[in-house]
Image (cartoon, rainbow, N blue to C red):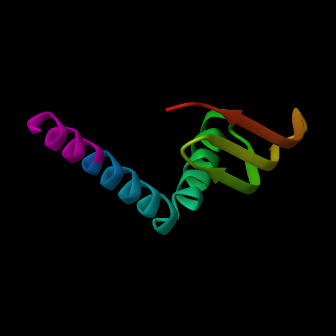
Amino acid sequence: MKNRKWLFVIISIVFFVNVVYYILLNMAQIDEIAKDRISKILSEKIGGEIAIADFTFNDRHIKIVGLSIKKDDELNLAIEQIYIEYNL
C-alpha cells in the first residue's frame, strides 16, 4: 500500500508541474519576449534589420512566420515560414 501512496504523490507532483508550466507559458507572453529577443540578437549579429510577423513557441514546436532579413544592398531575404518540432 505504501508503494501506491508514493506513486500517487509522484503523479500528482508531475501533473502540478505540467499545469503550472502550461499556465506560465501562456500567461507570461513568452512568444513576444522570445520574438523580441531573437530579433535583437540576429540584428546585432548580422548588422541588418530583422522583422518577424508571427512567432509561436510552446512545449512541442517553434513556428516563425514572415521572417524578413535586410542588410543594406548585400542581403534581402524573406522566409515565409520556419517550423521546428521537438520533444521534451
The residue lying at 44 percent from left, 63 percent from top is 23
Q: Which of 27 and 73 is in front in this view?
A: 27
Q: Nearer the viewer, residue 14 or 66?
A: 14
The residue lying at 58 percent from left, 61 percent from top is 32
Q: Along the horizontal axis of the image, is 11 left or right of 23?
A: left
Where is residue 80 drawn, in percent x and y? 89, 44
Where is residue 4 drawn, in percent x and y? 18, 39
Where is residue 68 drawn, in percent x and y? 82, 47
Q: Along the horizontal axis of the image, is 9 left or right of 18?
A: left
Q: Is residue 65 visible?
A: yes
Q: Is residue 71 visible?
A: no
The residue lying at 58 percent from left, 57 percent from top is 31
Quadrant containing the N terminus in the rendered view = top left
Residue segment shown in magenta = 1-11
- The verdict on residue 10 being magenta is yes
Q: Along the horizontal axis of the image, is 41 left or right of 66?
A: left
Q: Along the horizontal axis of the image, is 20 left or right of 1?
A: right
- The verdict on residue 31 being magenta is no
Q: Characterize the magenta stretch by its predominant secondary structure.
A: helix
The residue lying at 90 percent from left, 39 percent from top is 76
